[in-house]
Amino acid sequence: MIVRIMGEGQWKVGDAHFTELNQLDDELLAEMESGDEEGFRRTLGALLDAVRRLGEPLPDDALEPSELILPAEDASLAEVREMLSDDGLIPG
């Protein structure tokens, strides 16, 4: 799956890693719902770090369609809330 981090670029992440990413996404959703700004910041950073660590960066000139778009690390709680579906940032 191709994952875009807004303002940074794209990574190709294998399906085997989505269990870990979904766990972080579930934590992020819970922190957003409770208004835990500190937890939200920590978990958003961990989610983005996991994509960077587990994925293979695509060249800047690659024009692959992103199947998943994640917010930038400095995105506000309100901005991320607008991006959410019922499942969080990562469907499924």
Image (tube, rainbow, N blue to C red):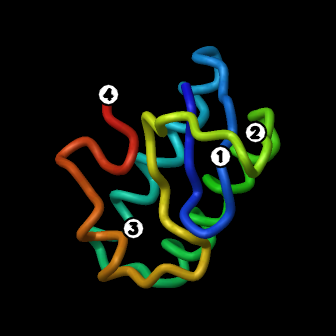
- Asked whether, in this view, residue 32 is left or right of residue 6, the answer is left
> What x and y, as percent, mark residue 28?
44, 59
Q: Residues within 10 Å of mark 2 (few under 14, many from 20)?
A: some
Q: Nearer the viewer, mark 1 or mark 3?
A: 1
Residue at (51, 39) in percent of width and height: 23
Above-or-below relation of 80 to 15: below
- Residue count near mark 4 (Cα–Cα under 10 Å), binned few <14, some 14–19, many ≥20: few
Q: Secondary structure at mark 4?
A: loop
* Badge number at residue 10: 1
Identify the mark at residue 31; answer none if there is no mark. Answer: 3
Q: Nearer the viewer, mark 4 or mark 1?
A: 1
The C terminus, quarter of image: top left
The residue tagged 4 is 92
* In-image side of 21 versus 66 (left or right): right
Residue hosting label 2: 58
Label 2 – label 4 distance at C-alpha: 24 Å
